Image (spheres, rainbow, N blue to C red):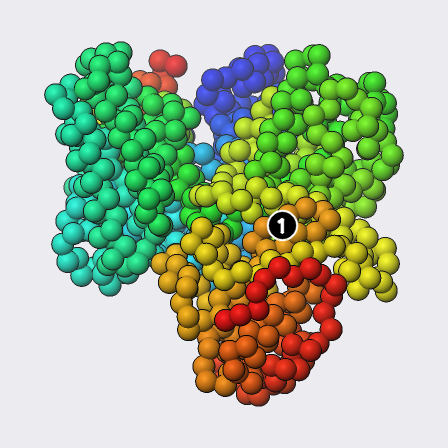
Amino acid sequence: MLDSRVLRVFREVFDDEQLAVSDTTSARDVPDWDSLAQVKLVIALEQEFDVRFSTTEIGTWACVGDLKRALRSKLGAA
Amino acid sequence: MRDRDALIERLASAGDPLGAAVAVLGADLGSLLEATERFGARPSTRHARALVDLGGSLAARTPPVELVEGGTPARSWLRAGLLAARGEHDAACDAAASAAYDEDPELRSFRELFCARQLARASDAATRSRAWPHLRRAALAAIDLGTLLTIDRLRGKLAGDGQPSARLRIRLAVLGTPTLDLLAPAIRAACFGRGISAELFVGGYGLYQQELLGPDPRLDAFAPEAVALLIDGSSLGVADESPDPDAVVAREVERLGSLWRQAQERWNCTVFQSNFVVPAVDPYGGLSASLPGGRAQVLRRLGLELWSAAARESGVHIIDVDQLASVVGKTVWDDPAAWHAAKQLPGPRAVPTLAHGLAGMLQAAGGLSAKCLVVDLDNTLWGGVVGDDGVEGIELGDTPAGEAYVAFQRYLLSLSRRGVALAVCSKNDDAAARAPFRAHPEMVLGESDFARFIANWEPKPDNLRGIAKALNIGLDRIVFVDDNPMERELVRRTLPEVRVVDLPLDPAGFPGAVAGTLAFEMLALTGEDRQRAASFRAMGQLAAESSASPLTLDAFIDSLDMTVDIAPFREQDVPRLHQLVNKTNQFNLTTTRMSEVEVRKLVADERFYARSVRLRDRFGDHGLVAILIARHVPTELRVEQWLMSCRVFGRRLEDVMIAHAAEAALAGGAVMLTGVYKPTDKNGQFRDLYERLGFSLAREDADGSLLFTAEARAIAARQGPKVRVVAPATR
């Protein structure tokens, strides 16, 4: 369920209904994934899951898997 | 089954209802449906979102799940999700619409966006085109950035499918110090909600000076009609403590002023300049504001100086970002994480506030501000139902809610004093509706504060049309305030042009809800604006009287006791003249727009007969309401522009004006009077004006322009209405 919600957020932010992401997908793999898209992504994830991310967390994401781990730990803690 | 109650309990109280619902999905459908009812009649946006997801996952079930219509909003959302996942877009939209409950702007924008997306996915263009009103309302209600960005994307994708024509098109360059790429689509969406089609040029991070001063071919090609300059206070290099604060303030005002002039010289554009947000966090703390050279004190002084500097220029307006930041909260406005990650300012959560604020200013600059607020009575101006509870039984004053209604009435009274017309539209017997105004001691508003007082049992959309007609304004100039969600929904659906306020349940929030629409925002306030409410009241009465006895309209006009003051253009009238030239759409025979500079040039230009008209009558002073500009050419006076405020239509003021022009023509040695009519979408009702005034059609051009001529002597001799004219009939 978390996977499908994360995927939906990615498709929305990158405006690509066919976009596929796996846990190993990183910013290098998605052409439009720049610092601005990163901000959009954070906003959209924060809205979707009702959480807040810190600068440190955002800075350490190397791939989608990292992002999901951060999400899971927040949701679990809530 | 043993777990059923526990599951329902978990779902109903879950912080993450979706996660809990996943668990329930393993259980039987009956439990699931029962559980959704526990979300109650007022699901939050998060619940609605979760329910849509849940409904979507039901679509994969075998045997197929069927959900009947009706039930709580929670059930409707579940059904909407199910239908959406099955591709039944139209039905999904209807299901979401039946979950109506719109007091919360976030949920309202979610619902409208859901409907718009469903309709936008339909295969036929006719259904897709029905997405527009939903999308527009979603944009008006949207308070979060993600929603605005989605709306902007959907708007782009839908473009072409029966898109309603824009009230205003504008090329806006957004330049400044922070990254502006997130702000730009949000501005476009906020403008779209207000019927403004904004084409944007987005400046580079920190490049505004180069873009404004250097030759920038891209910007020149774009030729902005408006430039928004968003300059972050921290970019000014104001020290923690300035040794010479006066010099800092003077330097910055001078520097920004020269940028404005540069922009205006290059593109003849309107400039919107942000002022400066005093930072929430300053190393000097409170000292920053108390020390003469403290950053906070310098930025505040600079802000005040900017207002004065802008007032000295024409076409420069200040975006009060310090106020916007205060309203949204400076810790939200200034989001250090977003700044460090992407040089984003304001913070993502504050971007919608700025986008709506700027869109509201563009609306005001385009002359599209609302003019009339139509208000319901029961549970809107007072608590309770006067028809049932009696004058003594209504809640007004005394109790906390009663005080809130009094405060709302005070707010409305102040609105009317600055030129907003008020009207009543209530489902009531007329006598019952008027009783509190006559007998309740706590009433702030009186019957005479309303331009129209409509209390009957007719459908409200019909009454709103009647009010618009009586006041001679478009439906898009009306804001509708009603506590009843069903009335609001009916008006939204039947009169999409009317701005319907999402009124909260608590009357304490009514003034904030009206203010939040920004519909009555204006960039300047002329004497005429202050007079306008009185004019509208006169018009309302005029409409009532003239419909009562249409045969005696001329007699009625004569009885108005009109005094018409026809004067050459004067320096002190330039702001109002400029406003009238650019805002008048109906009685505007050539719809030629002019800059303030061009208007000013007509003051004392001997080649022109340029006259402004002021009107007084027994209802009050209407101020400067009409303009006629004609050019003296040998043997002829050629009327090039003629326009009149819609507030004073139907009084034969046009007869008085043209007769005066004819006399001026004769005095100047001219024989003929000529006039041009150029058709637009708005001025059709004045196509035959010249003919009605005794002119003959001389020529019709390919673009539809009509040229009329008449002998000046004949026009001057025509019988006009009975008025007192105070004006010299000279050149």
Where's residue B324, x and y in %? 39, 30
- The residue tagged 1 is B622
SS category of the residue bearing label 1: strand
Q: Quarter of the image holding residue A66? A: top left
Q: Nearer the viewer, residue B99 or B262?
A: B262
Q: Nearer the viewer, residue B256 or B497?
A: B256
In this rendering, position of residue B721 left or right of residue B275: right
Q: Is residue B51 above or below residue B286?
A: below
In this rendering, position of residue B53 left or right of residue B172: right
Taking the spot 74% from the left edge, 66% from the top edge, the residue there is B721
Chain under callout 1: B
Where's residue B518, x and y in %? 50, 39
Q: Quadrant of the N terminus of chain B?
A: top right
Name of the residue lying farthest toward the bottom: B698
Where's residue A14, x and y in %? 31, 45
Does the image show residue B706? Answer: no
Taking the spot 32% from the left edge, 55% from the top edge, the residue there is B269
Taking the spot 42% from the left edge, 73% from the top edge, the residue there is B607
Taking the spot 42% from the left edge, 26% from the top edge, the residue there is B327
Circle 1 Cα neighbour tier, 10 Å, few/some/many (<14 / 14–19 / ≥20): many
In this rendering, position of residue B314 left or right of residue B548: left
- Disc 1 residue type (three-letter): His
Q: Quarter of the image holding residue B74? A: top right
Q: Quarter of the image holding residue B546? A: bottom right
Q: Nearer the viewer, residue B186 or B726?
A: B726
Q: Is residue A26 above or below residue A60?
A: below
In this rendering, position of residue B687 left or right of residue B580: right
Does the image show residue B9? Answer: yes
